[in-house]
Amino acid sequence: MKKIFETKWNAACLVLIPACIGINYIGKMFASLLKLPLWLDAIGTCIAGCLGGPIIGGLTGGITNLIYGITMGDAITLVYALTSLAMGVAIGIMARLGMMKHFAGALLSACVTGMAAVFVSTPLNIIFWEGTTGNVWGDALFAWTQSVHMPLFLGSFLDEVVVDVPDKLLTVIVVYLILKGLPKTVTSLYESKDAIDSLDE
């Protein structure tokens, strides 16, 4: 299993990271400007994780948040670099397990990635924002949970679930379709044969 984390530090992977950071950046700006109820800031992270593995995915996610937070003066984004890192690692592991090769596996990968984001973000929400996410849908649910005296952690957890899971479902489906359209000559640049073989043993 440890070979799941093996990474090809070749030119293709080194180019992949900034390219995918750019995709994340554009997606986040698009969602922010249009005030969409989803974030759309992890498409690049998921592409990087699926192609380059969990380490490349994690780096792409974390660095995206740092760059966006610094350039846009968005302290919230800086805080959630840990969440993006966790998502990149999660989708990378699922891809290395072969889950992104079929649609059902992609849906499962989306749920795992979304829940990874939920578990990392919920404590951060409580520490920094009194349990809210800053998302219209999620915070409306959070307000209701608090009005019926639900525990803060559970309310914040549900706040994250109703936003992160749908967001990652959409994100991973888009990534799945993108990967299906890539020629084998491109995807083979990122394959770690030793890691793949080890999963079949």
Image: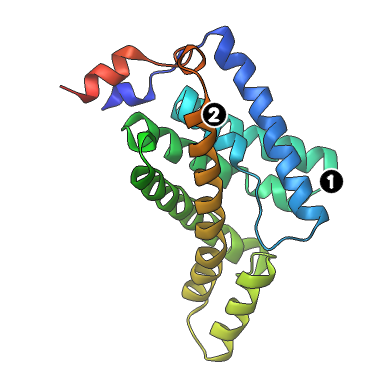
| Amino acid identity at mark 1 | Gly
In the visual, does 44 lie left or right of 86? Answer: right
Which residue corresponds to the image point at 35% horizontal and 29% vertical from the top-left?
96
Viewer-nearest of discs 1 and 2: 2
- Foreground pick, 115 / 46: 46
Q: Secondary structure at mark 1?
A: loop
Residue 175 placement (x, y as % from top left): 53, 38
Residue pictured at 75% horizontal, 39% vertical? 26
- Which numbered disc, 1 or 2, marks the residue that appears first in the sequence? 2
State the mark number for residue 48.
2
**Which residue in the protein does label 1 denote?**
73
15 in relation to 115, above or below:
above
Of the 4 image quadrants, the one containing the C terminus is top left
User: Who is closer to the viewer here, 80 or 136?
Assistant: 136
On the image, the x and y values in percent for residue 20 come to 64, 29
Q: Quadrant of residue 38?
A: bottom right
Identify which residue is drawn at 44% across, 39% down.
Answer: 91
Q: Which mark is residue 133?
A: none
Locate residue 130, reporting x and y percent: 64, 71
Q: Amino acid at mark 2?
A: Ala
